[in-house]
Image (spheres, rainbow, N blue to C red):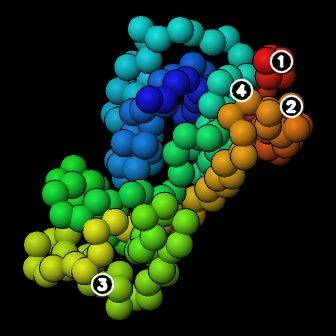
Amino acid sequence: MGGVLCVAIRRTNGDVYVGERNTNPLPAWLSDPAFFSDGKLVDKYIAAGNDESGMNAIQPVSYGIVLVDFKTKSILSRQNYTQIGGFFLCIPGDVYGEKIVQKLFKRKWVRQIKAVDHPTCRNFTYMDAEGMAHLERYVNKHDSFPHSLVVVEWCPPKWQIDDTSPSSVYDWKQEQWQEICDWLDVRGWNTTRLPPEQE
């Protein structure tokens, strides 16, 4: 499943990329610590969108919008597909996820973890520093772990992540458009923008 959303990235040098991108690969790109160095991984992400439909302006589409600003180290996420700054890890067997979480621990970016104890994922058990250390030992193959699904919450140092998922995929866009414009104005983005289309 999935669909498309608008992704806009302002690089450290001020260059701005805007694209209508598929939702499915987004969590993997934005949970990799290497993305936040504004280097080759960002280049690859932008290059990977060359075959997708182009956009000339910042405009929420379908699932929403994600804005990444390397100049001010901030992210605004208004989309209804994935959590930015949170990573679901299935235990055991999620080899790719374990490697990502290893990297997050290595850089000391993990803020907290939540064990998902309810089958509908609505009831989280927050885990303290001891629980975080336990998970770190697990992903480094030195320990077992009692939970089958956890959410690893993380944030790079000095970054701000503002992630709010709208309650509806389509109804939110007009209401939050001014908020998106204000966010861009405060950070000095001069990029062309268009209000969301009426569904």
Q: Is residue 113 above or below residue 129?
A: above
Q: At which x and y percent is residue 174?
A: 86, 31
Q: Nearer the viewer, mark 1 or mark 3?
A: 1
Callout 1: few (<14), some (14-19), or many (20+) C-alpha neighbours within 10 Å?
A: few
Q: Give the mark nearest the N terminus, 2 or 3.
A: 3
- Mark 4 or mark 1, earlier in chain: 4
Q: Nearer the viewer, residue 2 or 19?
A: 2
| The quarter of the displayed image where residue 49 is located | top left
Give yes or no for contact between labels 1 and 2 (Cβ–Cβ under 8 Å).
Answer: yes
The amino acid beneath tag 1 is Gln
Q: Earlier in the sequence, mark 1 or mark 2?
A: 2
**Residue 194 placed where, x, y %?**
81, 18
Task: Bin the neighbour count of mark 4 within 10 Å (Cα to Cα): few under 14, some 14-19, many 20 and up.
Answer: many
- Which quadrant: the N terminus? top left
Q: Tag 1's secondary structure? A: loop
Identify which residue is drawn at 45% across, 70% down.
Answer: 118
Residue at label 3? 133
Quarter residue 168 falls in: top right
Residue at 47%, 11% (x, y): give it. 52
| Amino acid type of the residue tagged 4 in the rendering | Pro
- Does residue 56 appear to the left or right of 23 in the view shown? right
